[in-house]
Amino acid sequence: EPMSVKSLAIVFGVGALLFLLVGLYAPASFLTHFTVFVLACFVGYMVVWNVTPSLHTPLMSVTNAISSIIAIGALVQIAPPLADGAGDRPGGLIGVLAFVAITLTAVNMFGGFAVTRRMLAMFRK
């Protein structure tokens, strides 16, 4: 059942208020990343929403490959510096979080490809 017009207006109003507060009080560097994040969420939602249900699982399993971007970012954080004095790498908690990100991303990527392989095997029969 679709949302009523009043409920939809309230949701959009609260969302607009939150975006206004973020725009007023967040630093400029955060706003750039936040804008890209919101646009990526919107595009991803629109791409998946318009797919027929029979193709949803293969699409989602292949899009897990996009997780490689997360793996690259985590590898950059966990890697040693390139040369002496080239800059310190963050340690401690950031290193642990980067390791966890690499582990979870690897599970996500390989699981997605395993699901894709099984789905393609079903279509071959």
Image (spheres, grey):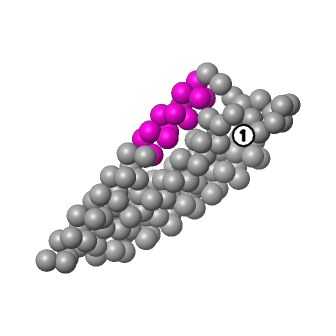
Who's the residue at 30% across and 64% down the image?
A: 116
Amino acid on which disc 1 is placed = Tyr
Q: What x and y, as percent, mark residue 41?
A: 50, 58
Residue 2 in view, yes or no: no
The one nearer the camera, 112 or 47, is 112
Q: From the viewer's perspective, tell me whether residue 56 is left or right of residue 82.
A: left
Q: Residue at x 63, y 57 (%)?
A: 36
Residue found farthest to the top: 92
Q: Which secondary structure dominates the residues rendered in magenta?
A: helix
- Farthest-out residue, left: 125
Looking at the rendered structure, the secondary structure element under dot 1 is helix
Position of residue 31 relative to residue 74, above or below, is below
Badge 1: how crowded within 10 Å, few (<14), some, or many (20+)? few
Question: Would you say residue 98 sits in the magenta stretch?
Answer: yes
Seen at 25% across and 71% down, the residue is 120
Question: Where does residue 12 sit, x and y in percent of width and height?
Answer: 50, 57
Residue 118 image position (x, y, % from top left)? 23, 64
Task: For residue 72, say whether it is visible.
Answer: yes
Q: Residue at horizontal 28%, vertical 65%?
A: 117
Query: Could you say which quadrant of the image residue 75 lies in?
Result: top right
Q: Based on the picture, tell me whether residue 10 belongs to the magenta stretch.
A: no
Q: Magenta part of the protein: which range? A: 93-105
Q: Nearer the viewer, residue 18 or 117?
A: 117
**Spot occupied by residue 90 in the image (x, y as percentages of width and height):** 69, 28
Residue 121 vs 82, above or below: the answer is below
The residue tagged 1 is 25
The image quadrant where one finds the C terminus is: bottom left
Instruction: Locate the N terminus by quadrant.
Output: bottom left
